[in-house]
Amino acid sequence: MGIALDGLVSGLKTTELINALMDVHAIPRNLMSAKADDKKLIISQLQTLNTSIQDLAAKAKAAAAGDSIDRFAATSSSKNVTVVLRPGATAVTADIVVDRVAQKHTVVTAASAEWPDAPPTLTLENAAGERVQVTAASSSMTDVARAINGAGFGISASVVAAGTDADGNPVQRLQLIAAESGEDSAFRVLRGDIAAAEAGTAADVVDAPGAGLVATGTDAQVRLWAGTAAEQVITSSENTFTDLFTGVDVTVTAASTDAVTVGITVDDAARTTAAADFVKQLASILTRIDNGSKATVGGGADDTTTLGVFTGDSTVRALRQSLAEAIQHPIDGVSPSSIGISIDRYGVLTIDEKKFAAALADDPAAVTGMFTGVAARVQQTAEMYSDKYDGLLTARITGQQSEVDVLGKQMERWDVRLEQRRATLERTYARLETMLSQMQSQSQYLTSQLASLPSFDSGSR
C-alpha cells in the first residue's frame, strides 16, 4: 500500500510526482497490453471465421454427395393417405389399395355398481399367451381400474358411467384398451387367478351379459400393384408404413377399395433454392473476408489509416483466394458460369437463379454433376483450413493465442517490476521528507542558539 507524504515538509505533491513517474515507467507495459488486446480481437474474428468455414465444409460435403440439392415433392390422390419424405427419398409413383387400418384391441365390461368378485382378482393375458395376476384394493370399479393400470401390462383401463340400475343406483363400466395397435395388441381379462386361467375355469369379462368386444386388434394392410401378378400385401401394426418406398413413409387413416396414387417427384424450384443458399453462404464468407481486409484511409492530413482485422493476414488472404478458385475454375472444361455461378471483376460471388433453373430443366444430370464438382472442391478447401487439428486457419489461431500467452507472462513480470519501482520511489520521497525535517530542525536550533548569544556595544571600551 502506498505511503501518502504530500506536503509534510517540502510542500511537494509527492503522490502526483510518483504517479507521473510511474506513467512513464509503465509505457512498455501499456504497449504490451494494447498489443495483446489487438491480438485477442484478431483471435475472436478468426475463430468466428473458422466456425463459418467448418459449417461451410459440412454443407459442401452434403452438396458434393448430391444430398443438399435433392429436393422432392410428395403427392397423394386421397386425403386419407399422407406421404412424408425422409433423407434418401427418390422419385417414384405408385398406386396402393388400403384394405384396412390398424386398430387397438378394445373391450367394455358389463355395467355394475361394483366388481362382481370379492376380492377382485384378475388375470391379464396378452396375444403371446403371457399372463399377469392383479388384485384390486377393493371391489370398486375405480380400484379395479387402478390395479389394471398399475400392472404395466399394456392395457389401459378407465371407468365410464353407465347410468343407474333398476333401484336407481349408479352403475359403471370399465373400458379396456390396448396401449398399442395391431394384431399383437389383442388381450383377454379373466376373472380369477392364474391357476384358474390355466385350468380354464376363469371367465372372460367380455363373455358377461352386457359386456362386449368393441374392436379387435388388427394390423393395417395395403396392397401394391393390386390386381396384377406382382400384387404385394404389406401389413403394419401402426397406420404408418415406414419406408414403404425408400425414404418414404405413408400413413393411412381409412380403408378404400379404390386405388390411391402416391407420387414423389423432383422439385426443381426447391433444388434451385438449395443451390442458391449454398452459393450465398459462400458469398457471405468471401464478403466478410473482404470487409475485414480493407484499410480505411483518413480524409485529412492528420487523420490516421485504419486497418481491417484481416489486413495483411496471409492465411486469410490465401483462404479467400482458394475458395474463389474452387468455385470459379472449370469442371471438365466447362465453366460454372454456364449454370449461373460466377465471380465478377470485383470478386463478388453471385448465382443467377433463373439461369441455374433453366440449365437444370434442360440437363439435370449435367447441372448436378457441375454443382457437386464445385462443392467437392469447396469442401476440400474448407476442410484444409478449418480442420480442428491441423487446419491452416486453426494453426493461425493457435499461433496468435501463443503470442497472447507470451505477452501475458511478460506483463506479469512488468507488473512486479512496476510495483517494486513504485515502492522505491515512495521510500525515496519518504527519506527526502525526513531529511528536510531534520535540516529544518537543525536550522531552527542554530537560529535559536545564535539569538541567545550576548550582544556587545561597539562604543564602550
Image (tube, grey):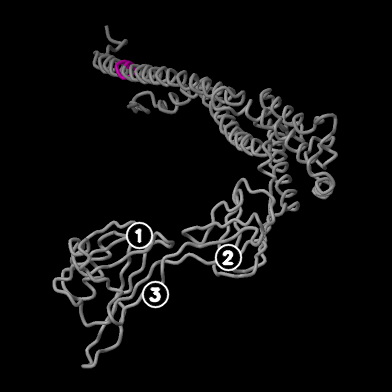
Q: Mark 3 or 1 closer to N-term?
A: 1
Q: Mark 2 or 3 closer to N-term?
A: 2
| Residue 101 screen position, x and y as percent | 51, 66
Disc 2 to disc 3: CB gap under 8 Å: no
Mark 3: amino acid: Val
Q: Which residue is mark 2?
A: 98
Query: Horizontally, is 374 left or right of 309 in the view?
Result: right
The secondary element bearing badge 2 is classed as: strand
C-alpha gap between disc 2 and disc 1: 25 Å
Q: Main secondary structure of the magenta part?
A: helix
Q: Residue at x 24, y 13 (%)?
A: 454
The secondary element bearing badge 3 is classed as: strand
Residue 145 vs 354, above or below: the answer is below
Whether 179 is among the magenta residues is no
Q: Which residue is mark 3?
A: 214
Q: Which residue is mark 1?
A: 127
C-alpha gap between disc 2 and disc 3: 22 Å
Query: Horizontally, is 442 left or right of 23 in the view?
Result: left
Query: Horizontally, is 398 left or right of 260 in the view?
Result: left
**Other residues around mark 1 within 10 Å, as few (<14) / some (14–19) / many (≥20):** few
| Residue 120 screen position, x and y as percent | 17, 71
- Locate the N terminus and report the quarter of the image it occupies: top left
Q: Range of the magenta residues?
A: 435-439
Q: Residue at x 77, y 39 (%)?
A: 349
**Other residues around mark 2 within 10 Å, as few (<14) / some (14–19) / many (≥20):** many
| Residue 352 screen position, x and y as percent | 81, 46
> In the image shown, does 334 or 449 lie closer to the viewer?
334
C-alpha gap between disc 3 and disc 1: 17 Å
- Which picture quadrant has residue 64? top right
- Locate the C terminus and report the quarter of the image it occupies: top left
Q: Residue at x 30, y 57 (%)?
A: 129
**Other residues around mark 3 within 10 Å, as few (<14) / some (14–19) / many (≥20):** some
